[in-house]
Every structure is written in C-alpha cells, then in structure tokens.
Image (cartoon, grey):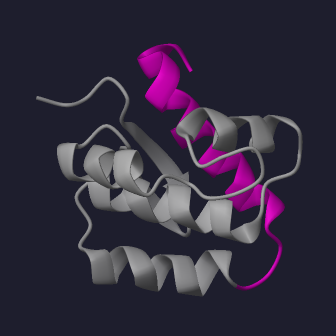
C-alpha cells in the first residue's frame, strides 16, 4: 500500500519517490526531527521553508529521509544528496523539499 503522503517527482536527473510517512522515517523524525530555528518538529521545519529561513541542512535532511522512505538505501540517498543538494544552487532543491514536507501534513492534497 502506497502512503498518500508519498510523492513521485522529477528531481536530480530522474524520477524519485519520496515519502516521510514510512514507519522507520517517522520514527527518526519523532526522535531527532529537523533541528533548527524554532524547534525540531516537522511543523517548525515547514515554517522555516514558508518563511524562507530554511538551511541547506533542512533541505538535505528532508530529501534524504524522503528518499529513504521512498525505497532508496541510506547510501543511495546520501549519494544523491551529496551530488545534487550539497553542490550548486539550493533553491530548486528547497522547492522539492518543501513539497515533500508539506505532503506529510496534507497527503495528496499538497
């Protein structure tokens, strides 16, 4: 069964499924979250994206966990993040990360 929070998106040169609703990923989010300004909850991170105050680490963490939740191994996800997010312009990756994070709150309505 596919989570209604999952997104299959064109990103980093291919189609990737990203899902923050996968059980292991949800456990990581509930224990470690997305550390940053105003707290580490998914809502605090979403607020940073909405306010344009996200960091590279916010973008990388959302996308990496989303990729793992979508079926990539941790090493595959990390390699994609290192190759695409940690080099070059960040804004396009931030748009994708925002969509993936928002999907955790609203499901297919995002």
Q: Is 5 positioned to the left or the right of 101 in the image?
A: left
Asked whether residue 17 is in view, the answer is no
Question: In terms of depth relative to the viewer, which is nearer, 28 or 17?
Answer: 28
Q: How many marks?
A: 0
Q: Is 78 positioned to the left or the right of 38 in the image?
A: left
Instruction: Name the residue: 55% across, 39% down.
Output: 42
Please tell me whether residue 90 is drawn above or below residue 6 in the rendered image. Answer: below
Instruction: Name the residue: 38% across, 43% down.
Output: 20
Instruction: Name the residue: 41% across, 53% down.
Output: 66
Asked whether residue 109 is in view, the answer is yes
Residue lying farthest top?
Answer: 109
Magenta segment boundaries in residue numbering: 87-110
Question: In terms of depth relative to the viewer, which is nearer, 26 or 36?
Answer: 36
Q: Where residue 45 sits: x, y (%)?
A: 66, 44
Q: Where residue 83 sits: x, y (%)?
A: 57, 86
Q: Where residue 36 sits: x, y (%)?
A: 70, 57
Q: Where residue 98 sits: x, y (%)?
A: 65, 42
Residue lying farthest left?
Answer: 1
Q: Is residue 21 magenta?
A: no
Q: Main secondary structure of the magenta part?
A: helix
The quarter of the picture where the C terminus appears is top right
Please tell me whether residue 44 is drawn above or below residue 54 in the rendered image. Answer: above
Please tell me whether residue 92 is drawn above or below residue 96 in the rendered image. Answer: below
The quarter of the picture where the N terminus appears is top left
Question: In terms of depth relative to the viewer, which is nearer, 85 or 51?
Answer: 51
Q: Is residue 108 magenta?
A: yes
Instruction: Name the residue: 56% across, 85% down.
Output: 82
């Amino acid at each position: 069964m596919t989570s209604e929070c999952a997104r299959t998106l064109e990103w980093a040169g291919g189609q990737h499924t990203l899902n923050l609703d996968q059980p292991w990923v949800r456990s990581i989010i509930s224990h470690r979250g997305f550390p940053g300004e105003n707290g580490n909850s998914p809502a605090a991170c979403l607020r940073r994206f909405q306010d344009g105050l996200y960091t590279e680490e916010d973008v990388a963490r959302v996308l990496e966990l989303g990729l793992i939740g979508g079926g990539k191994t941790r090493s595959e996800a990390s390699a994609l993040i290192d190759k695409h997010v940690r080099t070059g312009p960040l804004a396009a990756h931030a748009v994708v990360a925002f969509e993936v994070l928002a999907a955790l709150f609203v499901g297919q309505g995002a």
